Image (spheres, helix red, strand yellow):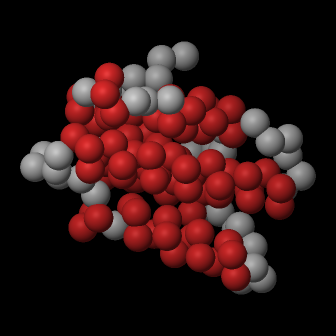
Amino acid sequence: MALASTGKALGAAEESAENSPIDSEEISLRTDSILAMRMGSTTREDIDGVTPAVVQHLNLLLNQDLGADKDAEVQQLVRKGLALIDPKERPTAGTPTFGAWLYARDVATLTRRLLWVYTELNGLDAP
């Protein structure tokens, strides 16, 4: 499985998120790929290549019932996720590479946390 660009812009990635099934293994692999990136050896092209897919996974998880109505910590994670996918918070072409790298790591970390919540609520094996 290639972990490079999905070929979709962030907006296009979101549009298909609601119709996609949760693939915990794929989400885990993609978030791992971002978290393994090192600032000194990662290019902006590398970051931009994997970030849209992880934003899509985050959006997909945010559209699931994660039990936020019963758990204040999950509510906080959902609020943070909604803020991260807000177009005003995303890196632009003018954002320095370091800013895009930090954003990608924030998205990947939060996506992994929400994936854990999802697997726990649904009695699935954690990836």
Image-based side of 120 in relation to 49, left or right:
right
Reply above or below: 10 against 114: above
Q: Is residue 52 visible from the viewing direction of this image?
A: no
Image-based side of 80 in relation to 113, left or right:
left
Could you tell me which residue is drawn at 83 percent across and 56 percent down? 120
Q: For the view shown, which residue lies furthest in the right direction? A: 123
Q: What percent of the width, then of the height, locates residue 96?
A: 17, 46
Q: What percent of the width, then of the height, locates residue 126?
A: 80, 42
Image-based side of 20 in relation to 72, left or right:
left
Q: How many marks?
A: 0
Q: For the view shown, which residue lies furthest in the left direction? A: 94
Q: For the view shown, which residue lies furthest in the top direction? A: 1
Q: Which sits in the foreground, 113 or 55?
A: 113
Q: Is residue 58 visible from the viewing direction of this image?
A: yes
Q: Quadrant of the N terminus?
A: top right
Could you tell me which residue is drawn at 66 percent across and 45 percent down? 22
Q: What percent of the width, then of the height, locates residue 68?
A: 69, 76
Image-based side of 25 in relation to 125, left or right:
left
Reply above or below: 18 against 31: below
Could you tell me which residue is drawn at 59 percent across and 69 percent down? 77
Could you tell me which residue is drawn at 75 percent across and 79 percent down? 71
Q: Quadrant of the C terminus?
A: top right
Q: What percent of the width, then of the height, locates residue 104?
A: 39, 45
Reply above or below: 114 against 51: below
